[in-house]
Image (cartoon, rainbow, N blue to C red):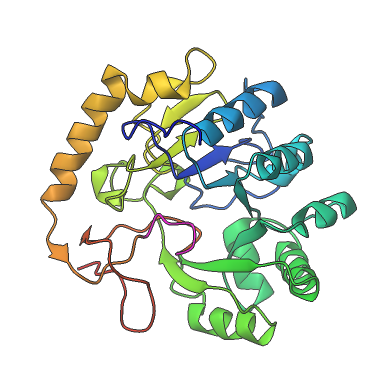
């Protein structure tokens, strides 16, 4: 048997934010991505090296996210490489456009999809995404994913009181989406900022706890929502060194202090677990003993 990862560096799940480029310009985008975004400084080789390091740190699953990860030409090779290293893969995509070869990649065992959805009405959906025909295209590709039996889960993001989020959930079930469909709320990060800047109140309480995010420029964050808390850069040092470095240690202490102030709710799911939803949700301090179903839901009060 190989050596076990150091508990201080063990990472079970990682977000790999391949790009800041996206066809859409959703007015709540936490990553502030859009058509003028870029793939950043990370090369395909940098991403391969990061995946290798994650595999060595005990990672079980990676999520390719953006921006829109399908716009990155290296995505197919990176998915194959992650699978070959024994990792499960999720691709968080807007499903606006899926190249034919990507359907073959997504159909591999060990791959699942996640997407965001906004309404059962095209006008409402496209008012939020600012993308012409985005509703039609996303809906069509959801149907194709279901037809191909590709595991897919959906977050219906509640950002506009005129959306009809419950109708959207009903429509998704009617389309045959059998995976998790969850209603989530706007995050005040990136373009989602409304009445205050991003702060620790936007975080779920699991940041940095066996989870890590890598940005297109190589920056490392405790999670994709804690973008204002970089703890290092994988282009300059190894993930293991970053996770045991002073910046990560100091940031983890600040997060732990904040999260410990929250009341302990024995039935709050591990919202950062990729099985629980396309995005993290702020919640009471999690007890880590609950699977989200039925009345077991985060308490936002």
Q: Could you say where residue 280 lies in the image, as x and y percent from the top left?
A: 40, 55
Residue 132 image-quadrant placement: bottom right
Classify residue 187 as left or right of residue 70. left
Secondary structure mostly seen in magenta is loop
- Residues rendered magenta in the picture: 271-276
Quarter of the picture holding the C terminus: bottom left
Where 297 sits versus 94, above or below?
below
Q: Between residues 25 and 12, which one lies in front from this camera angle?
A: 12
Residue 281 belongs to magenta span: no
Q: Quadrant of residue 223?
A: top left
Q: Nearer the viewer, residue 148 or 141?
A: 148
Q: Is residue 238 above or below residue 112?
A: above
- Tell me if residue 32 can be seen: no
- Residue at the spot x=50%, y=77% of the render? 165
236 relative to 150 in the view: left or right: left
Answer with the quarter of the image where residue 207 lies. top left
Q: How many marks?
A: 0
Q: Is 294 or 55 nearer to us in this picture?
A: 55
Residue at the spot 61% in from the left edge and 61% down from the top edge: 115
Say whether residue 188 is left or right of residue 134.
Answer: left
Task: Name the outermost residue toward the top.
Answer: 236
State the image coordinates of residue 234 (x, y, percent, origin top left): 51, 20
Q: Can residue 209 be seen in this snapshot?
A: yes
Residue 91 percent across, percent down from the top left:
64, 52
Work out whether residue 281 or residue 4 is closer to the camera in this orientation and state it: 4
State the residue at coordinates (56%, 38%): 16
Task: Please identify the residue farthest to the front as the structure is shown.
Answer: 1
Q: Position of residue 35 (x, y in %)?
A: 69, 39
């Amino acid at each position: 048997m190989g050596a076990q990862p150091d508990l201080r560096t063990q990472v079970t799940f990682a977000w790999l934010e391949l790009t800041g480029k996206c066809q859409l310009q959703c007015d709540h985008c936490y990553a502030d991505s859009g058509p003028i975004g870029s793939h950043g400084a990370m090369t395909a080789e940098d991403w391969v090296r990061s995946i290798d390091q994650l595999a060595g740190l005990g990672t079980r699953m990676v999520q390719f996210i953006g921006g829109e990860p399908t716009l990155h030409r290296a995505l197919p090779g990176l998915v194959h490489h992650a699978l070959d290293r024994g990792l499960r893969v999720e691709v968080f995509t807007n499903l606006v456009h899926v190249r034919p070869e990507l359907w073959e990649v997504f159909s591999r065992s060990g791959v699942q999809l996640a997407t965001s959805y906004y309404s059962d009405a095209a006008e409402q959906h496209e008012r939020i995404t600012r993308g012409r025909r985005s509703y039609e295209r996303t809906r069509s590709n959801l149907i194709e994913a279901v037809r191909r039996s590709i595991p897919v889960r959906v977050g219906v993001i509640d950002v506009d009181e005129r959306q009809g989020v419950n109708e959207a959930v009903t429509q998704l079930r009617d389309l045959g989406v059998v995976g998790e469909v969850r209603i989530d709320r706007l995050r005040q990060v990136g373009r989602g900022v409304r009445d205050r800047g991003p702060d620790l109140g936007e975080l779920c309480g699991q940041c940095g706890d066996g989870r890590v995010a890598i940005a297109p420029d190589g920056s490392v964050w405790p999670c994709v929502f804690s973008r204002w808390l970089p703890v290092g850069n994988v282009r300059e040092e190894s993930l293991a060194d970053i996770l045991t470095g002073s910046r990560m240690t100091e940031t983890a202490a600040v997060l732990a202090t904040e999260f410990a102030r929250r009341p302990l709710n024995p039935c709050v799911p591990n919202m950062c677990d990729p099985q629980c939803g396309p995005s993290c949700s702020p919640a009471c301090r999690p007890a880590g003993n609950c699977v989200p179903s039925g009345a077991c839901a985060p308490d936002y009060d």
